[in-house]
Image (spheres, grey):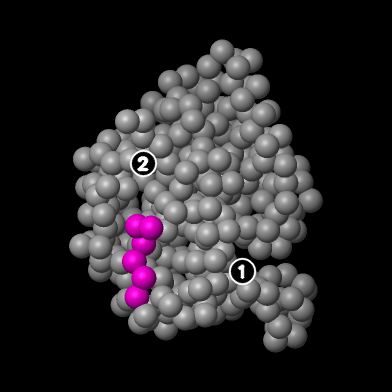
Amino acid sequence: MEKLGVISLGEAFVDYISIDRSNTKYKQLLGGATVNVAVGTRRLGIPTYYLCKLGTDEISQFVKQELRKERIGTEFSIHTPSKKICGVYVHINANGERYFHSYLNPTPDELLTEDEIRREVFEQAKIFYYGSGTLFHEKAKKTTKTALKYAKDSKNMIAFDTNLRLKRWESEDHCRKTVSSFLKDADIVKIAEDELNFLTETNSIETGIAILSKWKIPYLFVTMGSKGACAVMNGNKVFVAAPTVNAIDTTGAGDAFMSALLYCFHENGMPSKLTQLTEYLQFSNSVGAAATTEIGSLTANFDIVELKKQFLRSLKKGNL
């Protein structure tokens, strides 16, 4: 049986995005990094499964409806009446810039447990993806470790996005030690420049990459916002500048980048040449940049079909 699909493990969020400077009216949007990535991979044409715990109230129904609309599989998620969905409020300041205002989690201990993870989804999927959002809570961390075991047993590619949110951790030291301990289990790691600096306690990308080399990560990707991104494979580094776009909201740009990266690995496998790695980086940069052209992490309307065609032409041209 051919293995197909991406598994995304995490927590679903609802983003409440302020629509004016009074910060009293909000647009309700589906959110959360692992949800964003799941939506991204599905829009790119990859079968996608989302693993989380969902409730039965109005907000959970909204989340389920949005996931269903995106054709994301939730049959391996758990549904319980007591679960309440997390909410993130994003306000607008005096300069018209958006900023994180507050994070609400009505049921912080109502999480997917390790005994609720089903092995069969890993047996049929090709890639297992997760982020650090399931590591700061002890129960969620145990669940993640069980999922990792199933992924390894099923020979899935394992992708990890550090995606740090320090306000959710008890201390910086706890965050640094915990996240770093998971790097060794991943085939693919995506880390933002500031996260690299934090985890390695440096202010240099070169030094940070050198420090992470002890984990022997097969494919390391460092995103640098509007500057672009670099990738490291077998100690060799490539850099690709970001395309110029009219950026309106960078929310979810890193998640879009990650979705594109998973598409590349799912459809074309692990790159063996730097030229192929460069094409993966180019495509991921393009998708990440395009995601910044509208407000919200999942609202940008760009021609994903054309971007995919350009990517496939590049691979064919390079005989990769």
- Within 10 Å of disc 1 (Cα), the crowding (few <14, some 14-19, many 20+) is many
* Range drawn in magenta: 75-80
The residue beneath circle 2 is 125
Q: Is residue 317 visible?
A: yes
The spot of residue 43 in percent (x, y) is 59, 46
Question: In the displayed structure, would residue 181 be above or below residue 101?
Answer: above
Type of amino acid at the residue the image marks with label 1: Leu
Q: Quadrant of residue 236?
A: top left
Q: Position of residue 265 (x, y in %)?
A: 46, 33
Q: In the rendered image, which quarter is residue 5 located in?
A: top left
Q: How many marks?
A: 2
Question: For mark 1, what is the residue?
Answer: 29
* Residue occupying the point 36% across, 70% down: 79
Residue beneath the point at 45% across and 25% down: 271
User: Residue 248, how many percent across, how many down?
Assistant: 75, 58
User: Considering only order in the chain, which callout, 1 or 2, is on the residue closer to the N terminus?
Assistant: 1
Of residue 139 and residue 208, the one placed in the foreground of this image is 139
Q: Is residue 134 left or right of residue 250?
A: left
Front position among marks 2 and 1: 2
Where residue 256 appears, as percent x and y from the top left, is: 58, 49
Cα gap from disc 2 to disc 1, whole angstroms: 28 Å
Determine whether, in the image, residue 51 is placed left or right of residue 31. Answer: left
Between residue 30 and residue 162, name the one nearer to us. Answer: 30
**Left or right position of 30 against 98:** left
Magenta-drawn stretch contains 105: no
